[in-house]
Image (cartoon, rainbow, N blue to C red):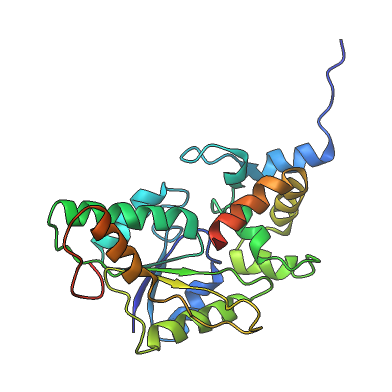
Amino acid sequence: MAAFYLDESVALAVESELRVRGHFVTSTYAEGRGGAPDPLVRLEAADRNWTLVTPNRHDFRLLHDAWLCCAQGWGSRRRHAGILVLDQVRGQTAIGTARLIDAVVRDPDTQLPRSLYDWRIRIGSGSPAHDAGRRGQRDADHIARAMRFTAPSSTHR
Amino acid sequence: MDRARPTTTETLIARHLEPDPAQPGPAEWRLKERAVPVWAIIGALTETGDNAPQVAADYGVSREAVAAAVTYYHQNRCLVEARLAANAA
């Protein structure tokens, strides 16, 4: 069971579908934070140790990179439950999205804590597959090199 | 002097959409209902838009709000497509 925080770009109905599958779920809408700036959403998810779920790869990758830089620059070992970025799939229902999220977090290869787990549709495969799950590690390594810090030995900072 | 009346599409957009104060720019406009970004609604629709009722139900917004998002998309197609492409990059 995981604890999820859905931002407003995720369909509201995904919340109840994930609860049916045994997860704790809340959302910016349910928390009265609808329309809140992304950095505050990110901070709230981290404070409460909820995995943030969003298709907003553009904004949350930038925020995650900034988080990594700050954490490494300030020597912070603060944990957070990670960010799960999902490709939007045209025509996919809330049930389909909830099934996908459930499958991703139940996959033993998925490592969410402290990372941005990037789930993408495999181009040309015709079926969803998470083929970019190690992106968080690559980002962390890249930033560590760029800032001349020692690359983390664990998977994610 | 007569003032030009807003068109139906302008009225629809004004009723249901607003800019995001935290992220200025036409690509970041959102629904007034639940603050759902227009790009999120467009990204959930099929090419033909035949699942619009399902998208409205899943997002917990009115069908008219989804129609406003589609109308806005047709007026700002390049910007919304670019925003979706930025997410896919």
Check the picture and name the quadrant holding the N terminus of chain A: bottom left
Point 39% across, 88% down: residue: A106
User: How far across and down, in percent of the image, does residue B66 sit?
Assistant: 70, 56
Q: Is residue A108 left or right of residue A119?
A: left
Q: Is residue A85 left or right of residue A157?
A: right
Q: Is residue A110 left or right of residue A124?
A: left
Point 84% across, 35% down: residue: B7
User: How far across and down, in percent of the image, does residue A43 sit?
Assistant: 29, 55
Q: Is residue A120 left or right of residue A136?
A: right
**Depth order, front residue of A7/B33:** A7
Residue B45 visible within the image: yes
Residue A116 visible within the image: no
Which residue is outermost to the right?
Answer: B2
**Depth order, front residue of B70/A71:** A71
Figure disc tally: 0
Point 31% across, 69% down: residue: A115
Which residue is outermost to the top?
Answer: B1
Point 20% across, 56% down: residue: A71
Q: Is residue B24 above or below residue A27?
A: above
Residue A116, picture quadrant: bottom left
Q: Is residue A55 above or below residue B10?
A: below
Residue A90, picture quadrant: bottom right
User: How far across and down, in percent of the image, does residue A50 sit?
Assistant: 31, 68
Check the picture and name the quadrant holding the C terminus of chain A: bottom left
**Depth order, front residue of B84/A102:** B84
Residue B42, picture quadrant: bottom right
User: How far across and down, in percent of the image, does residue B11 sit?
Assistant: 76, 38
Q: Is residue A127 above or below residue A59?
A: below
